Image: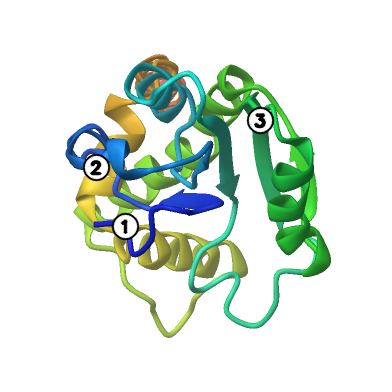
Amino acid sequence: MFPSSDNDVILICTSILSLSEVLNSMPLRRLKRHTLFVDVLSVKEHPRNVLLQVLPENMDVLCTHPMFGPESGKNRWKDLPLVYEKVRVRDETRCSSFLHIFESEGCRMVEMSCEEHDKVAARSQFLSHSIGRILAEMGIESTSMNTKSFETLVKLKESTTNDSFDLFSGLFIHNRFAQQELMNLEQSFEKVKQRLLKKMSEQQSLSSV
């Protein structure tokens, strides 16, 4: 599986849902020296926990999340965020050299704990994907009289549905903060709905006087 047993860095680029299976299938015994394992998954506590559980103590662990994809990063990475946590790093020089790849491309380097990342991502990335999926279920499409805000919704629907449902599922299943955000979304929708119904009832009452 490894082209060489003398790897400096091994980059884990699996789907969220397949991470454990892939890591457990790796012939780690073939590695002859300490290696830096880096993941780029969109959740962070899950890969951190799996890497610490599966890897030998002498392997370094760096958890990262480039906050951009093929579309947003297709032209350049300047000012796009790269979130990371040095989970278990003994060789600082090697770790810094890896991070410098992104820094040299102009990425905004954000050092953050895996827990804090998932907390923030649940309210931003997962929430965006959830709303995009809801809009897709509604079947919204561009019209001949789009407002700017509606165009934003159409673009959100298109960008989120371009990603696989497995990714969306992984953002929910393996981020312990996501379920609460989904509940918050449902409750907030219900509150807005009830305010509208109340206002409609008030107007109907006035009209009947």
> Which mark, by number, is residue 2?
1
Asked where in the image residue 84 lies, by quadrant, the reply is top right
Mark closer to the observer (1, 3): 1
Give, as a three-letter code, the residue at label 3. Glu
Tally the numbered discs: 3
Mark toward the start of the polypeptide (1 vs 2): 1
Give, as a three-letter code, the residue at label 1. Phe
Q: Is residue 146 left or right of residue 17?
A: right
Question: Label 2 neighbourhood size at 10 Å, few (<14), some (14-19), many (20+)?
Answer: few
Residue 207: x and y in percent read 42, 29
> Which mark, by number, is residue 68?
none
**Residue hosting label 3:** 85
Q: CA distance from mark 1 to mark 2?
A: 8 Å
**Residue hosting label 2:** 26
Q: Quadrant of the N terminus?
A: bottom left
Q: Is residue 143 left or right of residue 166?
A: right
Asked where in the image residue 149 lies, by quadrant, the reply is bottom right
Disc 1 is placed on an element classified as loop
Q: Nearer the viewer, residue 105 or 190?
A: 105
Q: Nearer the viewer, residue 155 or 175?
A: 175
Q: Nearer the viewer, residue 172 or 44?
A: 44
Above or below, 24 against 48 in this view is below
Above or below, 106 against 85 in this view is below
Disc 2 is placed on an element classified as loop
